[in-house]
Amino acid sequence: MSHRERLANLLRSKSLVRGEFTLSSGQKSNYYLDCKLTTLHPEGAFLTGYCVLELLDEMGVKADAIGGLSMGADPLVTAAGVVSAIEKKPLPGFLVRKEAKKHGRQKQIEGLENPRGKRVVIVDEVCTTGGSTQEAIDAAEREGAQVVAVISLVDREEGGSEKLRAKYNYRSIFTARELLADDAGSSGTARAAS
């Protein structure tokens, strides 16, 4: 079984929750993807790192660093960085704060010194409207980094990915539709909302 197939199974069993939810975008949904339950799980982190790096290889992307908006991107960035070291193809990570710190060096981007001219990949766990991903892209570009790829773990296919794809080399590892379709036939492996 491939890394991607194993990760899909984990996402369905650990992260897919049915019920009524309000998303960060304000939209209503009858399911929620609590991806951190997978990406912070030992096997889930390992598989996430491999899936991100395998997708970058498939896309033909060579980057200097990988990062995204904290908190959603934190587990993906760390997993990709660790797996890149295991594979002896080191890809440093960075995190983007919602806003620059008010003290110390007053940085918005942590972990990436001198971003100007660096080729970076922006990652996020779920793309709905693309707003949080765009925030990270904007911060990286303000610092002079070149965004060479944008990846989400799951694309909810609710408009955000189309906006990102119009301007950037955007891909997702999964679509919500494929996780939901396979879940429907798996006799209730997903957790129900309480």
Image (cartoon, rainbow, N blue to C red):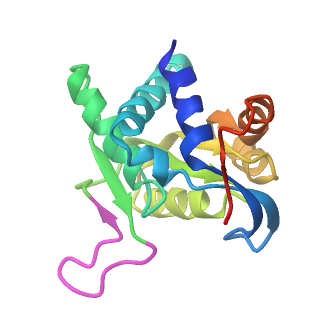
Up the image or down, 40 lies above or below 188; here it is below
Q: Position of residue 161 (x, y in %)?
A: 73, 46
Q: Quadrant of residue 99?
A: bottom left
Q: Which residue range is magenta in the image?
A: 98-110
Q: Nearer the viewer, residue 8 or 164?
A: 8
Q: Quadrant of residue 71?
A: bottom left
x 57%, y 21%: residue: 5
Is 101 within the magenta?
Answer: yes
Residue in the picture at 21% in, 20% down: 88
Residue 66 visible here? no
The vertical placement of 153 against 8, above or below, is: below
Q: Nearer the viewer, residue 77 or 117?
A: 77
Q: Residue furthest top?
A: 1
**Where's the C terminus, which quadrant?**
bottom right
Residue 147 lies in the magenta stretch: no
Query: Where is residue 170 drawn, in percent x and y?
Result: 64, 38
In this rendering, the answer to whether 158 lies above or below 194 is: above
- Give the residue at x 22% y 86%: 103
Location of residue 87 (image quadrant)? top left
